[in-house]
Amino acid sequence: MIGATNFVKKRLFPWRVQFTSLHQEYLIFLILVLPNLTLFAIWTYWPFIQSIYLSFTNWNPLNPVKTFVGLDNYIRLFTQPIFWQVLFNTVVFTVGVLTIRLTLSLGLAVLLNQKLAALGFWRLIYFSPHITTSAAMALVWLTIYDPVHGPLQAIFEAFGAEFPNVLDSTLLALPALMVVDIWRGLGYSTIVFLAAMQGVDREIKDAAEVDGANGWQMFRHITLPAISPVTYFLIVTGLIGLFRTFNLVQIMTGGRPLNATNLYVFYLYREAFHFQKFGYASAVAVVMVILIMAFTYLQTRAAEKWVHY
Amino acid sequence: MNRAHQLPRITIHKLLRQAGIYTLVIIGALFIGFPFFQMIMTSFKDIGEVYRSPMVIFPSEWRWQNYVDAFTLVPMGRFAINSVIYTVTITVGELLMGITAGYAFARLRFPFREKLFFIILITFMIPGQITLIPRFIMLADLKWMDTYQGLIIPQISSAFGLFLLRQNFKSLPQEIFDAATIDGAGHLRKMFSVALPMSKPILWTVTLLAAISHWNDYQWPLIVTNTPEMRTLPLGIQLLRSVMDLVHWNLVMAGATIVVIPILILFILAQKQFIEGAISGALKG
């Protein structure tokens, strides 16, 4: 009788009989991982798939009938001049900020690497914009750019010049926003460069010095290649981060004047949450992901040529 | 004799060089520090001084009253409470999720473990913006708009903390875990009394970085909340700008200072953790 139940049990619940410590480990793994994985599934993967689906519909929350429109949103997007202008602005902003920021911070890192006094103090100052609330600092920069009562105006007036209303100028508004983002990220890349430089092997440098290399040659042929993985990291993460710039635009300009500062994510946000065009905005979002993926892929391919691990 | 002749020239050269380096570093620091200076100075000015042209650098009288006014003009206390609730719960949630899953991915066997981990890591690559619209729809369907659960729950799962903690748990020496097994410790016991005490620095780093980044969140609360009662500080201070016809920039700057000062203080206290946390991602990734 007992043998028979055991036999049935074995057939019905084979896992139960073989419940070893390995299976117990699997179970604990699942218990530990599932809450996290469930949250990811619900709030990241599912919305991601939904976005792709929505981009093929003309859905908006006021008219809750979803009609499948095929590639219409994508065709509309690519035939709209404003989309190209937004993309152009975003590329100028992203590449501009990153180039200037990395160049300046490379120079600063070299300076800070010269056994300066109070290095901790300089690091503290340079790093602080990176962690402070950008939504608050955007307001501060509005007062700095104030064409009548601002500090820049005061400096210009001291030299007898007139400070232009930069945020109202189609030519200067985007560079003005770029300055803010250079200011925000300068310290972070400087500190990262500095840490990488301090990791460069002292012996290689000494050997090069013995061979008669001058400062520039050392920098160009030893330091730069040695820190290239970090440069690569800063470029990839920097571009992805800058492509997503939103707070500055939303708070400082609202995309004005004449869409001169309308950047990608702000455009997406406005199409979705002001004009309620959820289908179209989803297409904008999907294109953004494709652009970022393509860019990262290209960077990785290019990196094989200039990054030395 | 030759050497004696050259010595002073080298020191002068060196001195000039040092002076040049310090000048550049100080100019850079002034550029970086000025906005903070401007913010604090303006926050103490009288409204008449704010609108004086050309501007005055220092307030003629330090008006602490501006801070009181900022609190009474908009529900600043409420914003602050919301910000604290939002930041603390998400940070704690992220930590719990990161510790448990990070330990499992680092220390427990499971079929396809690495593939599963890779699937989570991909979320690093997915910009949050693509999930905004569907998340918005889901929150509306759940009637979670303008609620704490709507603000908090979608934000808890983070690949960032999970990744850092998993890397750290993986790097701990196996012998200690073996010894704990011999002493009869189960997996949960090992996680709490072996892995965690050995991981204090990285736990601090993850906590600080998560807390700061959520304290600063702007776009997500902007989309999820629509009543002033549910706004967090970074959004709330924007109201100071629109609430009066003549923008009282002194009050706006008082609001900005209130948001920024806690972070700056935290940063000064825990500078090492912040900087090392930021660097570790770059140097090890």
Image (cartoon, coloured by chain):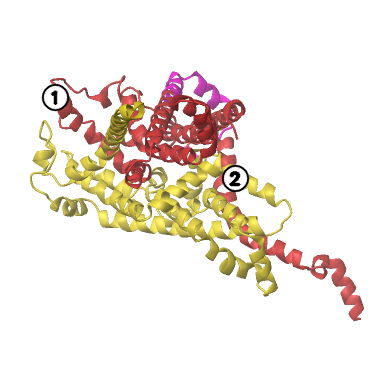
Q: Residue A199: in sight, yes or no? A: yes
**Circle 1 chain:** A
Q: Residue A201: in sight, yes or no? A: no
**A296 to B271, vertically: above or below:** above
**Circle 2 chain:** B
Q: Position of residue A286 (x, y in %)?
A: 55, 32
Dot 2 alpha-carbon crowd within 10 angstroms: few under 14, some 14 to 19, many 20 or more: some
Of A91 and A265, which appears nearest the observer?
A: A91
- Find disc 1 in the rendering and name its residue: A157
Q: Measuring 64% from the left and 45% from the top, which residue is drawn there?
A: B118
Q: Position of residue A233 (x, y in %)?
A: 52, 36
Question: Helix or strand or loop: what does disc 2 sit on?
Answer: helix
Of A127 and B261, which appears nearest the observer?
A: A127
The segment highlighted magenta reads: A63-91
Of A73 and B64, which appears nearest the observer?
A: B64
Of B175 and A92, which appears nearest the observer?
A: B175
Q: Position of residue A196 (x, y in %)?
A: 49, 39
The answer to which image quadrant residue A14 occupies is bottom right
Specify whether residue A72 is painted magenta.
yes
Q: Measuring 66% from the left and 61% from the top, which residue is drawn there?
A: B174
- Find disc 2 in the rendering and name its residue: B121
Q: Measuring 87% from the left and 75% from the top, which residue is drawn there?
A: A6
